[in-house]
Image (cartoon, rainbow, N blue to C red):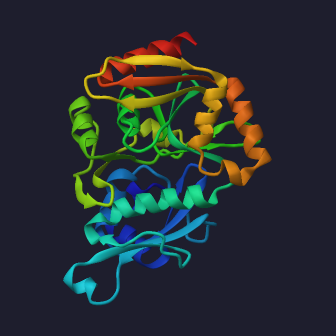
Amino acid sequence: MKIADLSLTELTRRLAVDGLRIKTGPFVFSIRSKLEAVRDGLVVLYDQFPTVESDTFADFHISVDRAKGVRRWIRPQSIFEFDGEIPFKPLTAGQGFALLEWGMNWCIYNHAHAFLIIHGAVLERNGKALLMPAPSGSGKSTLCGALMTQGWRLLSDELILINPNNGLIYPLGRPISLKNNSIEVLKKFSPSHHITAPVYDTAKGTVAHMKPSPDSVMRCSELTPPRWVIFPQYSANAETQILSIEKADLCMRLIDNAFNYNILRKKGFLSMAHMVTQITGFSATYSNLQDVIHQINRLTDES
């Protein structure tokens, strides 16, 4: 059963009472919330995601609800909680869905150490994965969203999950988090793809979320071998430039973007070293989405 199969009444009840259990890639989340912002975000962006029964094992039990005390009446706030822990400062109640997304990412990169986890986007085409590690503000999510509209399958825009035992990448298929100028850029680039209304004045500026393509959600259990790595960097008015990266530099730059390389120790090193032998690395500077996508497609078609 998908979230779209639930009536609004049943979805609201599960969120408020039992916990709504949804599967995204290898994880099951049990989500509790009475906030309309959370429920409405799930209805719009997660409608094709599978739900599981309330007695099914959940990897993470989380909640996003109103803060208690006087503030709940004067200026309602939302609080994210995971197993009694509150890792973030409260946000306004209207920012509850953004808080849910950040919290789900936090759960994975802090606890899912069965995977080598790299901060970055990852997409698939013709059975091979393109990794795009990069810090916030590099244009990673903008390029990721644009590639998804041009036939690439989204695996994730934030977390690259690599199985250290076989080197394959696990998809998550969740919405793409857009910030500030990237929201309008992608609305103009692909008007037919759904992007939520912007939420202003969050801890990360203005944020909105782009709905994953149906293909990205439907094939969320298909694992993919890594083939290319591109470190993207948006630069205003710059001509597109894609340059190759030597293996040693590629390895160090991937390690710099890893969440848990040190935690995994020998297994992390062996996994990273094996992956680097299998992939080709590039840096990409761009300002024009059509042009950089054309060059990425040509590059990946040739290798």
Instruction: Report the residue that reaches farthest toward the top.
Output: 302
Query: Against 65, is 176 above or below?
Result: above
The count of marks equals 0
Q: Percent position (x, y) of residue 166?
A: 75, 37
Q: Nearer the viewer, residue 10 or 194?
A: 194
Q: Is residue 275 left or right of residue 296?
A: right
User: Looking at the rendering, which quadrant does residue 8 occupy?
Assistant: bottom left
Q: Percent position (x, y) of residue 292?
A: 37, 20
Q: Residue at x 53, y 76 (%)?
A: 85
Q: Residue at x 26, y 67 (%)?
A: 94
The answer to whether residue 170 of the structure is visible from this angle is no
Query: Against 199, is 132 above or below?
Result: above
Q: Nearer the viewer, residue 101 or 22?
A: 101
Q: Residue at x 29, y 60 (%)?
A: 202
User: Looking at the rendering, which quadrant does residue 157 occupy?
Assistant: top left
Q: Percent position (x, y) of residue 253?
A: 58, 35
The answer to whether residue 150 of the structure is visible from this angle is yes
Q: Nearer the viewer, residue 3 or 73?
A: 73
Q: Percent position (x, y) of residue 87?
A: 48, 70
Quadrant of the drawing holding the C terminus: top right
Q: Residue at x 27, y 70 (%)?
A: 92
User: Looking at the rendering, which quadrant does residue 110 occupy?
Assistant: bottom right
Instruction: Report the residue that reaches farthest toward the bottom.
Output: 69
